[in-house]
Image (tube, rainbow, N blue to C red):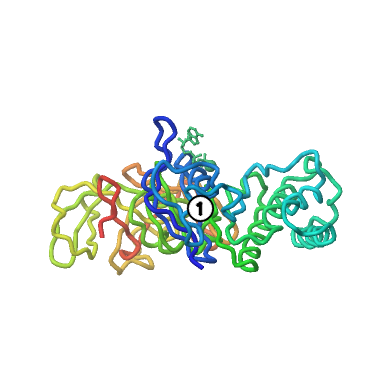
Amino acid sequence: MPGLRLDHVYKRFGRTDAVRDVSLAVDNGGFCAVIGPSGCGKSTVLRLIAGLESVSAGTIRIGGRIVNDVGPAERGVAMVFQDYALYPHMTVAQNLAFALQLTDEDGQQIQRRVRSTARAHQLEDVLVRRPETLAAGKRQGVAIGRSTIRRRDFLLFDEPLANLDADQRIAARREITRLHREYRSTVVYVTSDQSEALAMADRIVVMRDGQVEQTGLPLQLYDDPDTQFVAGFIGSPPMNFLPVVVRSAHPGGVTVGFAERPGADFTLPLDRWDVSAGTDMTLGIRPEHLATVSDLGGGGADGDRPGIRLQAQAEMIEPLGGWTTIHAKTTNGRAIVIRERGTSPLRSGSRLTVTAPTPRIRLFDQTGLRVR
Ligand SMILES: Nc1ncnc2c1ncn2[C@@H]1O[C@H](COP(=O)(O)OP(=O)(O)OP(=O)(O)O)[C@@H](O)[C@H]1O
Ligand SMILES: [Mg+2]
């Protein structure tokens, strides 16, 4: 069975174009995360798929069928919201059973399903309680259980874990992943937490201002972003961006240098003749791809390899156990973040040389497009 497909979908609210020309496809059984900053149109896309809003233009297909004119109840999708949307006057058991009342299952079957769903979501000991007496994690468990008690081929989640604390979030993540595997449902999962998307999805759609900025496999977006926006949105701490200037383009490479420091030029293996000397660009390098050499002047691990070298001073050291995050400032006053494995001997105020290997460096033009 085909999964889910949007073709050139638009949604206009008065004069706001909430969704503009969005096309996306989720394979049957796929797990697609939609991420992007607040207001970029994520919830609107989900509500359009669920049928809670109608499209201004474009086509939505669910399981191969065009559903533009099909009501929400007939689309065969279940949606889980951030704010749970549970019935406050009903117990947990009644909330779970409610979803089955319009089916032709008899009372005993319904009770059996309620019990097995409660078991799956660790809700057995709270079945007679009302939602408002439960902790946030349990409440979200009820909301997910209620949406999935009827086996659904299509599950839509709108930031379902946003109100949970860190522990509950990890448990709920595991639960949703398990459900997805067990039911082989097709999932569209909206989140503003890029790490959630990287961890759970097999495909990620990054949205910006109502449009799709880039779609890809999680690690493809991390390694090979098309734009500076995607590069900065995926990964934590975010990619460092530094202004550079093209010095020259020649066979096999483009030589760039830091705008303020003529001495620190380096050559990137780009086959581009269309970039001319003097062009301003932005260099991107992830914190985990930078290394520090605290012994100034001594060649570090990357000393003999091509790449960038920068002089900097450590400003703040965050030891995180397995990792250390170093916040530093380059000699020309640019803030950079370095993430190193293990513990670091550096102190705030330490002078250091920061290096990065050439293959890890990304370049972006002034419009934010990747220069490859
Ligand atoms: N019913 C509505 N009427 C008018 N404007 C709306 C409506 N729903 C959404 N919008 C607007 O559409 C745009 C996209 O909103 P949407 O809720 O889809 O964003 P979002 O990515 O889900 O944001 P958030 O991360 O804050 O939940 C926003 O500018 C929002 O104000
Ligand atoms: Mg939203």
Q: Amino acid at mark 1?
A: Gln
The secondary element bearing badge 1 is classed as helix
Q: Which one is nearer the viewer's eye here, 246 or 327?
A: 246
Q: Which residue occupies 80% across, 55% down?
A: 123
Image coordinates of residue 160 in percent, x first then y, are 62, 49
Image coordinates of residue 248 in percent, x first then y, are 14, 56
Observer able to see residue 291: no
Q: Which residue is mark 1?
A: 194
Report the side of 306 relative to 98 (left or right). left
Res 120 → quadrant: bottom right
Position of the C terminus by quadrant: bottom left
Q: Which one is nearer the viewer's eye here, 64 or 337?
A: 64
Q: Which residue occupies 82% across, 43% down?
A: 130
Q: Which residue occupies 82% across, 45% down?
A: 91
Report the side of 260 relative to 62 (left or right). left
Image coordinates of residue 81 in percent, x first then y, are 62, 46
The single residue placed furthest to the top in the displayed view is 14
Residue at mark 1: C-beta within 8 A of ligand 1 = no
